[in-house]
Image: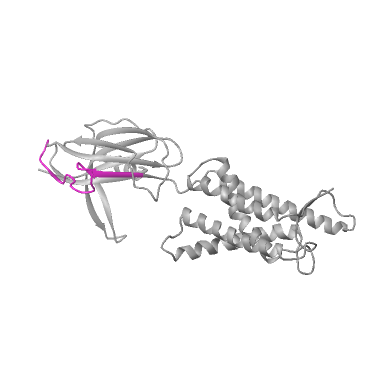
Amino acid sequence: MRIEIKKYPADVILCMLWSLILLPVALLNVEGTARVILGLPFILFIPGYILIFALFPTQKTDKGIDIIERIALSFGLSIAVVPLIGLGLNYTPWGIRLEPILLSIFIFVVGVGVVAIYRWIHINSNERFTISFDLSFPKSESKLDRALTVILAASILIAVVSLVYVIVTPKTGEKFTEFYILGSGGMADDYPRNLAAGQNAAIILGIVNHEYKTINYTVEIWLVNQTISHNETTGENETIYDHMWFVDNLYATLNHTPIDIEGAWEPQWEYNYTFSIEKKGNFKLAFLLFTQSTEDYYHDVDYKDIAKEKIDGAYRETHLYIQVT
């Protein structure tokens, strides 16, 4: 059975209407399946198909190509045309952003579509390419031709399904956690550096979860007295932990926060932490971040023997150097 449309280039008109429908869906940032269904053909198929139609508006002859060849070439040309449009936009004031790319491809589709319709109308009606669906293999085709047609159609179907899966499946980027200290004014300065024994000081601790899963964070705070010595054998400096006392711990359960490279940075979890140091000397106040629960420690015990293991085992570490008089 063969179905054919001869009165007008329905495929070109459909491509142009499809692109027009996508505009408000994409520009209004409509999420969901509809955006994916409309967007994939708009990027991967329509630009190439419109261009192929403008170049070959005739039927399968010495000057034309058949429907299978059109479909295969449409995917290939679309993959070539869309990046070229993006490359051109890169050298314009608009840059490579959603709106300029979307509108540029739409203008390309409509412009080339008008040329395609014009060429189609001005050729002999008997030579015009028209959409037709042949639901059975022509008897004149050999078994090899049939097999190649089936393989080509299956390859196109597999490629489309694979692309849909890759686009629809949530993408996992680099996994990391932001762990930082701010001064009491909320800026990366004005840290407490010189304190009197027993004097209160305040800072802000912050955590942002970009790990693509919910994590129960533990922050351990340690007061460290350390010295740096030069190892003559290795020729490198070594850290010697003379003392290490447990100060405090904090807990935070945070969900994953997507990275927004275009919008303004926003904190996820911040804690106003106030502390004082009773001992006198030069210390490093170390803040160790762990992604699981940790052991309990005593405040009056010197844990210098496990200092290196503890600090090296932390998922993230930040610190302040403080002189206490």
Nearest to the observer: residue 83 or residue 103: 103
Residue under the point 63% across and 53% down: 15
257 to 133, vertically: above or below: above
**Res. 97 in view:** yes
The image quadrant where one finds the C terminus is top left
Instruction: Identify the coloring.
Output: one colour
Residue 324 is situated, as x and y percent measured from the top left of the image, at: 13, 43
Residue 193 magenta? yes
Q: Position of residue 207 (x, y in %)?
A: 33, 40
* Magenta span: 178-198
Main secondary-structure element of the magenta-colored stretch: loop
Residue 41 in view in this figure: no
The mark total stands at 0
Residue 36 position in % (x across, y down): 57, 45
Q: Is residue 308 left or right of residue 76?
A: left
Q: Residue furthest bottom?
A: 62
Q: State the residue at coordinates (72%, 55%).
A: 8
